[in-house]
Image (spheres, rainbow, N blue to C red):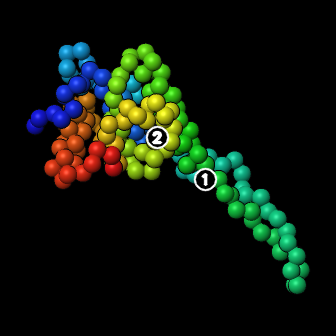
Amino acid sequence: MKDPFKHGWQGRRFVLANRTDAVIYRYGADGEFEFVRRLSNPSGRKAERELVSDRAGAKASSAASGTIRHALDRVTNHHEGRAKRFAARIGRALEKARENEAFEELVLVAEPRFLGYLREALPPGMRKLVSEEIGREFKRGSDREIHAWIVNLAKERADRGNPARA
C-alpha cells in the first residue's frame, strides 16, 4: 500500500493519544517510521471515585416539614480535568520538540473527545502545523503495525473523500 505521508516525511510527526498514553512517531533519516517518545498519565486509568478524596459536602435547607439535608453536587469531573491536564502536557512536549527538532507538520490521532482537548492545548503556532486529525482510539501494537494502521486510515479517508480534519 502506498504511504500517503511519505512525501515530505522529514518534517512530519505523528501523535497517537488518549487520556492515558501518548506516543509520538516520525520518519527517521532513513525514511523508516520510528518511535520518538511516550508520555503516560497513570491517573487516566483510575475510576472517578479513586480521584476524589472524599464525599460531596452537604447543605441544610428549610422546608415546611423541617430541615432537609442535600448533598452538594460535584460540578467538577476529575477524570476530565486530568485528561485536559495530560493534553496540555502533550502540547508542551510537542512545543519543546518543535523547538529542538524543527518539524513542520503534525498528524493527530485520538478518540474524538481527547482530540478536542489536544486542539485546545496546542499553542496557536502549533495548531497551524496540524495537517490531519483522525478521531479514533489509537491502535496498540508494534511500530510497523501502527504505521500500517495510520496509512490505512488515511487511505480510507481519502477514498471516502473526507477532509483532512475530522
Residue found 20% across the figure and 51% down from its top: 161
- Which label was assigned to residue 111? none
State left or right for residue 154 relative to residue 119. left
Query: What element does badge 1 sit on?
Result: loop
Return the x and y of residue 50 as percentages of the image width and height.
60, 48
Residue at 72% x, 51% y is 54
Q: Which residue is mark 2?
A: 118
Tag in front: 2 or 1: 2
Q: Residue at x 60, y 53 (%)?
A: 77
Q: Position of residue 138 (x, y in %)?
A: 33, 43
- The crowd level at tag 1 (other Cα within 10 Å; few <14, some 14-19, many 20+) is few
**Disc 1: which residue:** 77
Q: Closest to the observer: 52 or 11? A: 11
Circle 1: residue type: Asn
Q: Earlier in the sequence, mark 2 or mark 1?
A: 1
Describe the element under mark 2 as helix, strand or loop.
helix
